Image (tube, rainbow, N blue to C red):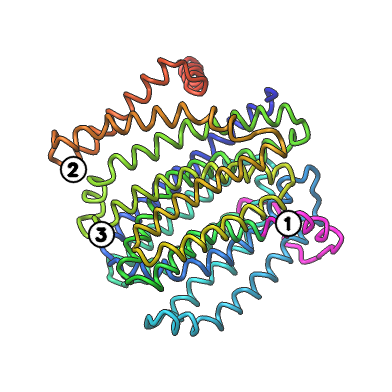
Amino acid sequence: MSENTKNITINGLFWNAIDRFGNQGIVTIVGIVTARILSPEDFGVIGILLIFSTVATAFIDSGLATSLVRTRVVGERDYSSMFVFNLTASLFLYALLFFAAPLIEHHNGIEHLALYARVMFLQILIHAFGIVQYVKILKNFQFQITARINVIAIFITGIIVITLAYLEYGVWPLILQPVLYAFFRTVLLWLWGDWKMDFRIHYQTLKRHLSFSLSFIASNIMGKALSPFYYSFIGSHFSISNTGYYYQANKWGETPNLLISSIIQGTTLSTLTPIQDDRPRFLNACRKTMRTLAFVLFPASFLAIAIAEPSFSFFLTETWQSSVPYFQLLCFAGLFISLGDMNVNFLNIKGRSGLSLRLEIIKWAFALVLLAFTYKHGLFAVIYGQIGLRIACFLCAAIISQGVYGYGIVKQVKDIFPAFFISLFSAAIASIPQQFSLVSHELSLITTQSLIFVMVYIIFNQFIKNEIWLEIVELLSRKFSKSH
C-alpha cells in the first residue's frame, strides 16, 4: 500500500472500530437486558419476521450504494438517481409486505403477527431516506461522522427499548427496535450530511450503475437472507421456543464474526477501490487485509466459544442455557462466513458482482439440499449442516478469487492458519479452569478464562514474530510516545 492509502485505511479502521464496537456494545447491553425480561417465544416471533425485513432492507441498500462507493468520480445526478430509485423501491416493497402480512400470520399461526409485521417493516421506508447521505459521507472518507451517527442512534434506541421492556410491553420492544434505530439514524444523517434532496432521475446514469448493481443486489439479498431464512425454516418445523433458543444462539454466535469483518469490509470498500486495477498492489493489500481479519476474528470467536457456558448463565440467566451448544457451533460456523464474505468483498471491489451472485446461488443450492436431509434428524443436524455449508462456500470463494486476482486457497490458508492454530490452542488452555472446576463463581470464571486466553495468544504471537502483532505494537508505541 502507498503511505496515503495506508493512512486512510488506518484512519478508516479506527473509526469503523469505534462505530462497530460502540454500536455492538450498546446492542449487547440491550440484548442482555431484553433476554433477561422477555421469553424465548418473543424472540421466536422476531426470528420469523426477520427474513422479510432483511430481504427488503438489503434491496434498498442495493448495489447502487456499492456502485457509487466504488466509482471514482460521482456527480449530483448519480446521487439523485439513486435516491429516487431507492425511495420508489422501498414504497413498493412496503406496500407488498403490508398486504402480505395477514398471510404471514395465517401461515405461522401466531396471533397479532400481521400487526407486528406491518410496524416492523416501517424500517424499510425510513431507511431509504438516509442511504444517499450515508454513501456521500463514505465517499469523502468521513468515517468519524458515520461512527458518531450510528452510536448515538443505537444509544437512544437502546434506552427506549429497555424502558419498554421494563414496562412489560411484551414483544413490542423487539418489534420497535429496528424501526427506531432507522428513524434516529436517518434524522442524524440529514443533520450532519451535506446532500440536498433532489428528485431528478437520470436514466442513463441509473442504467450505468444498474449494470453493476443488479447482480450485486441479488447476491446481497441472498447473502443477508440466509440466516433469517434458517430462522423462518426452523420456526416452521420446530417449536417457537426452540426457534427462540436458536435465534439467540445465532445472533450472539454471528456477532464477533460479523462485527469484526464489517469493520474491515467497511474500510476496504473505500480504500482499496483506487488500486483495484493494479494487480500486484491489490493482491498484496488483500493478503494483508485477510491476515488482519484472521488475527482479530479467530481469537474473538474462540474466546467466545470457550466462555460461552458461564457467560450465558451469568448474563442471560439459566433460561437460555439450551442455547449454549447451538451458540458454540454457530460461532465456529461464523468464522467461515466472514472469510467467504471477505472474498466476496474483494470481488465486488474488482467489479465482479456477477461472480458474487454465482457464489450466492451455489450457497443457497447447498443450503436447501442440506436442510432437506438434516431437519428430520433434529436441530443439531441442521446446525452441523450449516458448518459444512460455510466451509464449502469459503472454499468456492477462494477458488474464484484465484482466477480473478490470484488469491487462492493455498495462499489464504497460509495467511490465516497461524491465527487459527494459536486461537484454538489458547481456547484449549483457557478451558482448563472450567473443565476441572477450578473457579466456581461465574463472573470470576469468565474473567480468569479471558485473561488466560489473552496472555497465551499474545505470548505465542510475540514468539513467532507475527507481522500483524508487531505492527500493532509499533503503532501503539508511536501513539504512546507522542502522548508523552
Of the pair 27 and 322, the residue shown nearer to us = 322
Q: Label 1 neighbourhood size at 10 Å, few (<14), some (14-19), many (20+)?
A: many
The answer, for residue 483, to whether it is visible in the render is: no
According to the picture, the residue beneath numbered tag 1 turns out to be 213
Secondary structure under tag 3 reads helix
Secondary structure under tag 2 reads helix
Q: Residue at x 63, y 52 (%)?
A: 359
- Report, in whole angstroms, how far the alpha carbon at label 1 lies from the one at label 3: 42 Å
Of the pair 200 and 285, the residue shown nearer to us = 285
Query: Residue 206 magenta-drawn?
Result: yes
Q: Earlier in the sequence, mark 3 or mark 2?
A: 3
Q: Residue at x 65, y 33 (%)?
A: 407
Vertical position of residue 200 compared to residue 445: above or below: below
Of the pair 418 and 42, the residue shown nearer to us = 418
When asked about the image quadrant of residue 249, the answer is bottom left
According to the picture, the residue beneath numbered tag 2 turns out to be 442
Mark 1 and mark 3 residues within 8 Å of each other at the beta carbon:
no
| Image coords of residue 60 (percent x, y) | 64, 63
According to the picture, the residue beneath numbered tag 3 turns out to be 36
The answer, for residue 3, to whether it is visible in the render is: yes
Mark 3 and mark 2 residues within 8 Å of each other at the beta carbon:
no
Residue 184, numbered circle? none
Q: Residue at x 41, y 79 (%)?
A: 108
Amino acid found under the numbered disc labelled 3: Arg
- Report, in whole angstroms, how far the alpha carbon at label 2 lies from the one at label 1: 49 Å
| Image coords of residue 91 (percent x, y) | 65, 74
Secondary structure under tag 1 reads helix
Amino acid found under the numbered disc labelled 2: Glu
| Image coords of residue 216 (percent x, y) | 68, 55
Q: Earlier in the sequence, mark 2 or mark 1?
A: 1
Of the pair 105 and 271, the residue shown nearer to us = 105
Taken as a whole, is the magenta stretch helix, strand or loop? helix
